[in-house]
Structure formats: C-alpha cells, structure tokens
Amino acid sequence: MNKIKLANKLNISPLIHGLWRLPDWNMSDQKLLQLTEQLIELGITSFDHADIYGNYSCEEAFGNALFLKKELRRDIQLITKCGIKLNTHKFPERKIKIYDYSYKYIISSVENSLVNFGTDYIDLLLLHRPAPFFDPEEVAKAFSYLKQSGKILHFGVSNFNPQQFDMLNSYLDDKLVTNQVEISPYCLENFENGNMDFFLKERIKPMAWSPLAGSEILLPQGEKGQRIFNSLSEVANELDVNSIDKIAYSWLLKHPSGIIPIIGTGKISRIRNAIDALNIDMSIEQWYKIYIASKGKELP
Ligand SMILES: NC(=O)c1ccc[n+]([C@@H]2O[C@H](COP(=O)([O-])OP(=O)(O)OC[C@H]3O[C@@H](n4cnc5c(N)ncnc54)[C@H](OP(=O)(O)O)[C@@H]3O)[C@@H](O)[C@H]2O)c1
C-alpha cells in the first residue's frame, strides 16, 4: 500500500485505523496487539486517537497493547488530539464541558498521551475542535515547545473551517498538515462550506471521520440513509462489487482532494473491505449518483 506524504518526514497510510469505538470491541491487550499487527501487515500503519476517547481510556489501552511488542512503535504513526475537557467522574473538579487550548493544558494533555501510549513522541497532534475562546499565541507557544522537545513531530486540526485553519496557521512556524473532518456520502457539509475547495487550493489532504456515517448508510434508519444505501447498491451492482461499504470508501478515495478515510470498525473482514476499495474506480457519473442520492434532488 503506497504511503501518502502529509509533510516532509510524515508519511501515513491511505487508510487510517480509528480507535474511538475501541471500548465496544471488548478486546484484551493481546487481541488488540494481534489486530494492530494484522493491520500493519496489510499496510495500515496510521492510528487515530484522542485523549478523550473511551472516557480517557483508549490511548492507554492501545499503549498496553504496544507494550507487548515495543518494536512496533517504529512501524506506526500515532495521531492523537487534545483540547476537549470532558465533564466526567474522572475529573470531579470539572463542572461543565469546555475546550481548553491554553499553553499549560495543551502541554499537560500531550504529556499524558505520551505516558498513555508508552512512547516519547507522537507523530501528529490535532486540535480536536475549533473554539470560541482561542488564543493562537498560546497555541503557537505550546506547539513550538512540543516540536523543539521532540514530543510532537507534526501538527494539524480537526473540524476547522478555512478561516479558522488560516488564522491559526498564520501564527505557526511549523504549518498545519491536515484537517480531520466528517466526510461521507451522508455528510456533505465539507463540500458545501468551502473546506473542500480550501483543501484543493492549499494541497492539504483531509482525513475523513465517520466515513460510513457510523453505519447509517449501510443499515439505514432514515429516508436519507435509505436513498444512499440504494445508490451504493446500484453502483456496487454496476461494478460487480460484493459489498456496499467498499463503494462508500471508494467514493471518498475517488475525490481529487486525496481524502484519507478513518476506518471505525475493529472487525478485520470489514477492514479488508476498506482495503479492497483502494482498487475500485467508479465513474464520475457513479460518484454523482451517490452524491445526488444524498442531496435528495437533481443538481441545479
Ligand atoms: N475528529 C473528530 O471529531 C472525530 C469524530 C468521530 C470519529 N473520529 C475518528 O473517526 C473514526 C471513524 O469514525 P466512525 O467509527 O464513526 O466510522 P464509521 O465507519 O462511519 O462507523 C463505524 C461504525 O460502522 C459500523 N460498520 C462498519 N462497517 C460495517 C458494515 N460493513 N456493516 C455494518 N456496520 C458496519 C461499525 O460497526 P462494527 O464495529 O460492528 O464493525 C461501527 O459501529 C473514529 O474511530 C475516530 O478515530 C473523529
């Protein structure tokens, strides 16, 4: 599987494995290690986390699995996020959920992530969400310290719009390398809010979270999901492809911006379907069939 270059010295796999749902998978450290090794063998070497996943438990669980085979660290790229402070029993002093991008909090969050993963560096740190209270000078100071200390190799953001991305970038020496946003046949928001044009202009490859809309396009509960399901099934028939999740992934991979889907399942057969999608090439007409099904109306 060819790697994708996000920056000088940052090459990641064209599919990322996302660990948000890890608590649902009920895996022992050994099982998670096995899965991770299988993924690396298949060419998926990049792993997406956040400090808060699993109520602050997923990074540590992944670190425990890595501990069983420490040499894997050099074969993988670790992505994690910071900035959201959950109101949870783990932090009884917090009365409400807030976003904190102060120098002090960013550093302490990263220090924590490093301990959780049992590593001394993280390949890519993302700011999890844009915030109404945000001091880019504090963020720049934190990034500069983290870079110089070798604790974080690269920086990016998640769920930012072009203005927010540009604003932060203007304060940074080490430029942002990606924006992780929700993109799927169900969620077209980033085609419509200027982000996709911005990615193309800036040559930024976006990461797509919830590429299957959390399964709504495979097991639809609503009318829109059903329309998309029908269009995916039609295209699957036309291309003689046996599983419609492959079509959903290939719809993302087809886009000229170089979307990198984040796979949300822990089931190896479903992960293999995502890999198969790398070899499917739909026509532009088929791409639009799915887009139009999602919109629920013809193009203007
Ligand atoms: N930056 C952000 O704000 C943000 C937000 C959300 C997520 N993320 C990242 O994005 C990753 C992926 O998100 P996601 O988990 O929502 O992705 P997703 O692929 O849209 O949804 C995964 C869900 O779909 C189900 N699924 C997968 N393949 C299926 C199939 N063939 N048939 C039926 N169901 C199927 C999975 O169930 P099974 O587990 O049973 O296969 C799982 O419940 C996360 O792990 C996280 O790393 C980032």
Image (cartoon, rainbow, N blue to C red):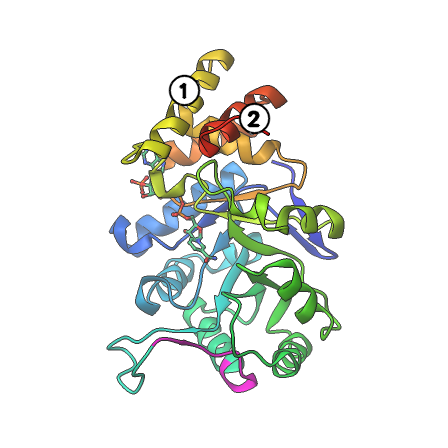
Q: Where in the image, quadrant-wise, is ligand 1 located?
A: top left
Quadrant of the rendered image containing residue 143: bottom right
- Percent x, y for residue 68? 39, 58
Q: Quadrant location of the N terminus?
A: top right
Residue at (57, 69) in percent of width and height: 121
Residue for point 44% across, 30% down: 296
In the foreground, 237 or 162? 162
Query: Going by the picture, which residue comes out furthest to the front?
Result: 300
Which residue does the image show at 42% across and 59% down from the upper left?
66
- Residue highlighted by disc 1: 233
Residue 108 rendering spot, x and y as whole percentages? 48, 82
| Mark found first going from the N terminus, 2 or 1 | 1
Q: Residue at x 49, y 53 (%)?
A: 47
Q: Is residue 273 above or below residue 112?
A: above
Of 27 and 144, which appears nearest the observer?
144
Q: Secondary structure at mark 2?
A: helix
Question: Identity of the amino acid at label 2?
Answer: Trp
Report crowding for label 1: few under 14, some 14 to 19, many 20 or more residues within 10 A (C-alpha). many
Please count the marks in the image.
2
**Considering only vertical position in the picture, is 219 above or below 203?**
above
Three-letter amino acid code at the position of disc 1:
Ser
Spatial distance from mark 2 to mark 1, Cα to Cα? 13 Å
Task: Name the secondary structure under disc 1.
Answer: helix
Is any part of residue 287 visible from this angle? Answer: yes
Quadrant position of the C terminus in the picture: top right
**Is residue 99 one of those drawn in magenta?**
yes
What crowding class fits label 2: few (fewer than 14 Cα within 10 Å), some (14-19), or many (20 or more)?
A: many
Residue numbers of the magenta segment: 97-105
Q: Position of residue 246 (x, y in %)?
A: 46, 28
On whether ligand 1 comes within 8 Å of the CB at mark 1, the answer is: no
Task: Name the residue beneath numbered marker 2.
Answer: 287
